[in-house]
Image (tube, coloured by chain):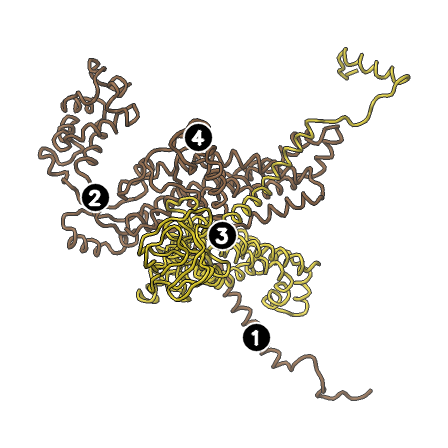
Amino acid sequence: MAVNVDVAHSEAIAQALGRTTDATVDLRAKPRVHERLIKLALFLCGIVSVLTTIGIVVVLGRESIAFFTRTSWENTNKPIVTEVDEAMTTFEIGTSGAALEVGERIRLGDEVMRITSLDGTLMTVERALDGTSAQTHREGLSIETASSVSLREFFTNTKWAPQIGEFGVLPLLNSTLMISGIAMLVAIPLGLSAAIFMSEYASPRLRGIVKPLLEILAGVPTVVFGYFALTFMTPLLRAILGDGTVKIFNTASAGIVVGILIIPLISSMAEDALHAVPQSLREASYGLGATRLETSLKVVFPAALSGIIAALIVAVSRAIGETMIVAIAAGAGPNFTFNPFESAETMTGHIARISGGDLSYDSIDYNSIFAIGLTLFAMTLLLNLLSRQVIKRFREVY
Amino acid sequence: MRAQTTQPTTTYMPPDEVFRQRLAARNRRGLFSRILFYASVFTALLVLVILFLNVLNETFGTVAVQYEIPPETLTTAVTSLDELEKGDLVAILDEHVGRRFRVILRNALSQVPDEQYTTAPLRDVFNGKIFPAELGNHVIGDLEQHQLASILQSNLSQSQLRDLVMREVVVEEVVASWPLYDTLFNKDEIEAVTAEEYPEATLRFKSWINRDFLTTPMSSVPELAGIRTAILGTVYVILIVLAVSLPLGVGAAIYLEEYADDSRINRMIETNIRNLAGVPSIIYGMLGLAIFVRLLAALTSGAVFGVEDSNGRTIVSAALTLALLILPIIIINAQEALRAVPSTLREASFGLGATQWQTIWHTVLPSAIPGILTGTILAVSRAIGETAPLIVVGASTFIVTDPDGPFSKFTVLPIQIFQWTSRPEAEFRDIAAAAIIVLLLLMLAMNATAIILRNRYSVRY
């Protein structure tokens, strides 16, 4: 026989066969330890992504909490009129400087106090709080008040100026939304037209050329788009509208280029949605005498609407999170303005600028960018979840 | 049979004439919107073309250069420096450079680290170079000017010496530059402006992307700046990104495709990966800053491995951050590649008695590898272009020393581009454009590799 069984093996087999008469062969599955270990290792690889998410949430959350709970001391320029020794709890204060309120925490030198009553220029305090010790303070020393950033201030203050203790995210949020809005104005018509063109009008050959070309646009690094915005789009806008109207750094130019950046995203996702609409719907429409445009807009487009809306939401989320274009072309310095030709820093632009310098840990700047980051993360996450929900809930199944 | 009324009271079709008008209007609308659709696609592609032309426009152009000491005043005997003998060139250096001679010698020939240059014996300093053997135990400070000159003359070629003279004595300075468009179409204007504003300057065509640009480190003078450190930084970062994200990503994809049942935790992993793909890249930068740069500073600065004078803002931190950033993309791509392997292959393998891991390792992975590699290369090429997270993680904006390991400070190409773009001077825009071309070529090369891999090794079932 041609079967090649070596001696030792054939003996073992014979033995095994021989023994079947008095003992059964154990056919139960054997524990395979290394198979289990491999499975565990692969599972851990999958867990890394979960850890990443947890890491993002923890890091952003922790530093944001530190930002909202930290006290910084601000000089009120209000002096004490007489010298205050270690035992005094009531003393006279000057009339100049910012007003104080009962219950407020104040600081003189290194000592923290709390105001218990305030009678004109006569102030009564509780002394040596927060583990500080009572000290003698010289005449003319200014009082500092504790200030912390409340959530309300963060979301309603229209000024972001860390050096004077103003932390309102609105100017940053406003320019972010403005740039995203301009971007969508550019990207929605162009992106959807391109999608309808590729799905409904172009021959397979033409589509095979156009689609990869648009994907090249999607693959260009965003820093290159930023360069394009600053060296091409801004001069173009200035040439059309005049140097006086359009600043060198402006949100319009950044917004238009962000729009160009997300055209391929919209066109490719929307085209997938349009492509998935069954051919029979189109044929039925043509059979009723509809033109190609009517079929596209009144039959195919509504049928693919859930996918198209999801694409648009993802595109907005991408525009909000875009950093390099706005960091290069939209300008440095928060500015609460609705004029698209003025410079205004966005949330991402601010994070990039602040962290690009020599940032010391535990400074208010360090904490503040995480508070902005958390806002940004929450916005994009909500948009992404929303787009998934739209697809799930409103999807037409044929 | 009743006679039909010639004019029916109700009708579903308009009269012929009206119908024809409406049809014509509908067709006009169709044609009009068709033109609009074509125009949209054309606009998008036009922008792509303009984007590249804009970069090319700035990379090449005319520059007006002035010399500190014009080359023609250095020599009377011949017209060009190219025709001078080595000895004459060294003599020119000797005459004009003076005490900088030692620095020149160090840059050209030194074999020891810069800080040891003045203390190490010449035997070590010029190890492998030509120098008088009897001076082996001396240090550089002991040498006379003419000895330095002769060492230089015996080690460098004529063209190297000529470059030295150009760099150290002639010192070319770009006083104005014009982009390619003006060079081609406004030649007269350029000449007129130059004649008026820089009467001593000469005009010449310059490509900002050239060999010196690729091989010299950063400088604060745009004409002398290069991207050597940035290219090396990019290469280092990418190698580590690949080493970290490829095994992790493929492992996770195998788990999700081959092992995972429809349990809650597996669904959570799956959802989580899709969500991570939508997180803005700058958020990853903040994660990297808090975790890798700060929390794990002892590891990422290399302190536990005995590396000193470094903080957490190193190549490792940057690479780990980028690895996390592209991990979701790699996983999603690898999952698709694994899904494309037909289940008949797996069943055949199981039927032969193979275990699950044997099936994956010997049957599934070999068929999926081309797809996995293609997806990975595309993801890595995205990582090459990422700028925002690296700004946050703390890429250096100005370093002149090559990165010498995973724990050194670094800069990468996109950071350099960003840095130069942010400067107001026109010349910095020019070198930013040149760096963009290098970056795009690098990405093009990677994408081409991916496509070739896909076409060459992909198997159809």
- Label at residue B24: 1
Dot placed on the residue nearer the N-terminal end, 2 or 4: 2
Nearest the eye: B448 or B233: B233
Is disc 1 in contact with disc 4, using a CB cutoff of under 8 Å? Answer: no
Provide the letter of the chain coloured yellow: A
**Residue reaching furthest right?**
A21
**Residue reaching furthest front?**
A87
* Residue B46 visible to the viewer: no
How packed mark 3 is, by other alpha carbons closer than 10 Å (few <14, some 14-19, many 20 or more), is few
- Residue B161, given in percent of the width and then of the height, sits at 20, 29
In the rendered structure, the residue with mark 4 lies on which chain? B
How packed mark 4 is, by other alpha carbons closer than 10 Å (few <14, some 14-19, many 20 or more), is some
In the rendered structure, the residue with mark 1 lies on which chain? B
**Mark-to-mark CA distance, 1 and 2:** 68 Å
Amino acid found under the numbered disc labelled 4 = Ala
- Residue B313, given in percent of the width and then of the height, sits at 42, 38
**Mark-to-mark CA distance, 2 and 4:** 43 Å
Q: Work out whether disc 1 and disc 4 sit on a shared chain.
A: yes
Dot placed on the residue nearer the N-terminal end, 1 or 2: 1
Amino acid found under the numbered disc labelled 3 = Thr
Q: Which residue is mark 3?
A: A69
| Residue at 16% over, 54% down | B197
Amino acid found under the numbered disc labelled 2 = Glu
SS at badge 2:
strand
| Residue at 54% over, 54% down | A380
Provide the letter of the chain coloured brown: B
